[in-house]
Image (spheres, helix red, strand yellow):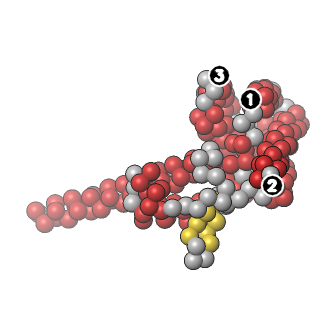
């Protein structure tokens, strides 16, 4: 009997250890992603493992795993024999991705108006109010997290797993650009108004209107992103 107890305890400890490693892995990914998305690590910055491990309070093993994962999202580029750098924001690539995302979000909006439950709509409304609170306080990073949750929730309400999967993969590549689009307070305020209109269309289950609002929302973000990228290019050329 004592041997069985020892075995059970060992198994429990192994499960706990595995869960702890998974949590650490996800935490390091999230924190490194935030540094990139929020611009603390600029495009083409070399990722120094020693410096980043110290900054994030972790060892190099989970950091390397996080770098590889973010490379799969398009936020990091792995260079043969030269380590890793923050992926550059390429204007032509941004245009391509935003056009496709706009079409995907428009489709999701139409399907969400048909398929969303009242509980789904209540959840989106709650996320919206949290987002508004952070906007009022000028907290862009926190605002952006709720903003992204709302867009993902629209996808989930559509009831199409393939649509959600494709969207998540593409959206990961332009998270920095979407964050950048709100760095102008004027554009940020406009984005909030667009979200209020989107929520109203969803509540009224007006699929045609929500389709148009979501497509225009992405198009407006692309305009701001291109202006920001062009400004950076002009500054670098001086």
Task: Report the residue marked by disc 1.
Answer: 185
Q: Which x, y percent locates residue 157?
A: 70, 42
In the structure shown, which secondary structural element does the residue marked by tag 3 occupy? helix
Point 73% across, 48% down: residue: 177
Is 38 positioned to the left or the right of 232 in the image?
Answer: left
Q: Residue furthest front?
A: 238
Report helix, strand or loop for mark 2.
helix
- C-alpha distance separating marks 2 and 1: 26 Å
Image quarter where the N terminus lies is bottom left
Q: Nearer the viewer, residue 230 or 173?
A: 230
The residue at which mark 3 appears reads as: 136
Judge from the rendering whether residue 235 lies leftward or rightward of residue 61; answer left or right. right
The spot of residue 96 in percent (x, y) is 84, 57
For marks 3 and 1, give the one nearer the viewer. 1
**Helix or strand or loop: what does disc 1 sit on?**
helix
Residues at marks 3 and 1, CA–CA distance in whole angstroms:
11 Å
Rendered position, 10 above or below 121:
below
Q: Earlier in the sequence, mark 3 or mark 1?
A: 3
Foreground residue among 140 and 161: 140
Q: Is residue 30 left or right of residue 212?
A: left
């Amino acid at each position: 009997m004592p041997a069985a107890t020892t075995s059970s305890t060992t198994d429990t400890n192994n499960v706990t250890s595995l869960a702890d490693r998974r949590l650490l892995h996800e935490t390091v990914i999230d924190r490194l992603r935030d540094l990139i998305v929020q611009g603390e690590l600029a495009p083409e910055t070399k990722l120094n493992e020693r410096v980043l491990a110290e900054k994030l309070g972790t060892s190099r093993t989970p950091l390397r795993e996080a770098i590889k994962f973010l490379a799969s999202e398009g936020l990091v580029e792995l260079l043969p024999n030269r380590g890793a750098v923050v992926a550059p924001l390429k204007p032509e690539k941004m245009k391509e991705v935003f056009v496709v995302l706009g079409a995907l979000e428009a489709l999701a909006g139409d399907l969400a108006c048909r398929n969303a439950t009242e509980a789904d709509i209540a959840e989106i409304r709650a996320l919206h109010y949290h987002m508004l609170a952070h906007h009022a306080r000028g907290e862009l990073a926190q605002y952006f997290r709720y903003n992204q949750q709302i867009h993902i929730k629209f996808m989930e309400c559509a009831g199409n797993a393939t649509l959600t999967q494709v969207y998540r993969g593409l959206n990961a590549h332009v998270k920095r650009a979407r964050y950048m689009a709100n760095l102008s307070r004027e554009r940020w305020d406009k984005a909030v108004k667009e979200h209020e209109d989107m929520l109203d269309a969803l509540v009224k289950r007006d699929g045609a209107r929500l389709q148009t609002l979501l497509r225009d929302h992405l198009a407006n973000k692309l305009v701001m992103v291109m202006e920001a990228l062009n400004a950076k290019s002009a500054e670098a050329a001086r």
